[in-house]
């Protein structure tokens, strides 16, 4: 074997797990975003007033933007783009903040989202993940 030939390295197992989690979160966010937008639109089209419709539309569209962002990041993780890691960490940090707010609002299931966000952030801050994205 030629020592100067580039060595092909495989993606670390933790990053594969993060990609799977990102796709799951993207599908969930996208679905909920469409459900929110559909519910508000159908209520408005039937003549019902929707209090805070602007905020609800914002949350629906934000969910779809987050879904697309996570899907793009998951798809480009094997390509080792340096911006993927901080983007996922930012999205997960926002999800973590939202989960804490939901937890204090009495939604006990927010614990699962908080744990998932913490797990992803911790995994992306490990040396193997940092090395993967620094090429």
Image: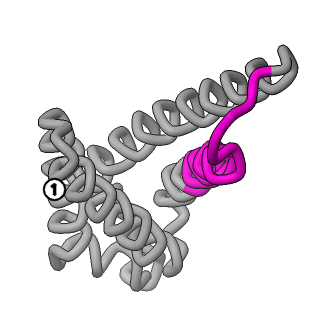
Residue 36 visible (yes or no): yes
Our reading of the magenta stretch's main secondary structure is: helix
Residue 72 visible (yes or no): no
Q: Which residue is mark 1?
A: 119
In magenta segment, residue 47: no
Magenta part of the chain: 48-69
- For this rendering, which residue is in front, 106 or 124? 106
- For this rendering, which residue is in front, 66 or 77? 66
Q: Position of residue 17 (x, y in %)?
A: 27, 44
Q: Is residue 92 above or below residue 36?
A: below
Residue drawn at x 69%, y 43% as measured from the top left: 53
Q: Residue furthest top?
A: 46
Q: Quadrant of the N terminus?
A: bottom left
Q: Is residue 75 above or below residue 133?
A: above
Query: Which secondary structure, mark 1?
Result: helix
Total marks shown come to: 1
Q: Quadrant of the C terminus?
A: bottom left
Residue drawn at x 41%, y 40% as measured from the top left: 25
Find residue 88 and report its image quarter: bottom left
Residue drawn at x 48%, y 72% as measured from the top left: 87
In magenta segment, residue 57: yes
Q: Is residue 24 above or below residue 72?
A: above
Q: Is residue 75 left or right of residue 45?
A: left
Q: Is residue 48 left or right of residue 72?
A: right
- For this rendering, which residue is in front, 103 or 4? 103
């Amino acid at each position: 074997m030629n020592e100067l030939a580039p060595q092909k390295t495989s993606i670390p197992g933790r990053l594969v797990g993060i990609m799977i989690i990102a796709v799951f979160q993207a599908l969930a966010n996208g679905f909920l975003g469409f459900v929110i937008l559909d519910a508000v639109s159908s209520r408005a089209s039937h003549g019902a007033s929707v209090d805070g419709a602007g905020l609800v539309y914002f949350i629906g569209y934000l969910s779809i933007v987050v879904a697309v962002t996570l899907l793009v990041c998951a798809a480009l993780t094997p390509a080792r783009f340096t911006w993927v890691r901080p983007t996922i960490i930012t999205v997960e940090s926002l999800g973590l903040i939202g989960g804490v707010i939901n937890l204090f609002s009495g939604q006990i299931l927010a614990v699962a989202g908080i744990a998932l966000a913490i797990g992803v952030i911790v995994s992306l801050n490990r040396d193997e993940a940092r090395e993967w994205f620094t090429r």
